[in-house]
Image (tube, grey):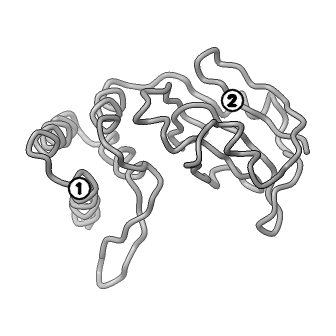
Amino acid sequence: MRALSINPQNKEIKELDIEMKANTLYTFFSSILIDEIPTLKEHMVYTDANALSEGKVAYFLGESLLVGDALILGRYDFNDVDVKIKEDELASLIRYEINEFYKAALELLGKTDINLYRSFEVEKNGEKIALNAEWVLYTFNIADERTKEYFLNELKKALESKESVEAYIQKMAQLAMNAAG
């Protein structure tokens, strides 16, 4: 099966011919914890869920924040198929520049066992909305400088007081939803 891999350390995209078996993803990442990120239409992006805590390189694929190596396969009816996107198209969607807010937030979150993509629910106007830590980072990144500082300072406090970082992130998501009106 044709796949593409992204290595953010050397900014390399490679085409791979892989045989999908039960352990293919675990072998590729040398990890049993794999994130599935459906950020590309008709594709699934796989990453190592441990990459954040291991301090791997972060980058953007479109608007999605990824950390560490990625493996991309095509997706059709919940099945992995040959990748459809071309290497040059994929390369045009990648940004390796990460701003200071993201760097600081990821460094702090890397000290925890939080998963950027695990969803949780917040409520807005009586409706439950599924969000994740990646969305929270994105939302606070587009805020003003004081709000970014507040987010990072409160995150530091949560870490120092050994509070649940997941609960903190969920609280920040709820604040962001409330502020959205």
Residue for point 67% across, 46% down: 45
**Which residue is situated farthest in the top direction here?**
10
What amino acid is labelled 2 in the image? Ile
Residue assigned mark 2: 6
Q: Quadrant of residue 138?
A: top left
| Above/below status of 25 relative to 17 | below
Q: Which quadrant: the N terminus?
A: top right
Q: Nearer the viewer, residue 104 or 90?
A: 104
Q: Which quadrant: the C terminus?
A: bottom left
Give the number of the mark in front: 1 or 2.
Answer: 2
Residue for point 28% across, 64% down: 177
Label 2 residue SS = strand
Relative side of 74 to 37, left or right: right
Residue for point 83% across, 40% down: 3
Marker disc for residue 103 = none
Please tell me which of labels 1 and 2 falls first in the chain: 2
Where residue 71 sits: x, y (%)? 71, 39
What amino acid is labelled 1 in the image? Met
Where residue 135 sits: x, y (%)? 41, 52
Q: Residues within 10 Å of mark 2 (few under 14, many from 20)?
A: many
Where residue 29 sits: x, y (%)? 64, 37
Marker disc for residue 172 = 1
| Above/below status of 141 relative to 41 | above
Residue for point 76% across, 67% down: 78
Label 1 residue SS = helix
| Above/below status of 13 relative to 50 | above
Q: Quadrant of residue 93?
A: top right
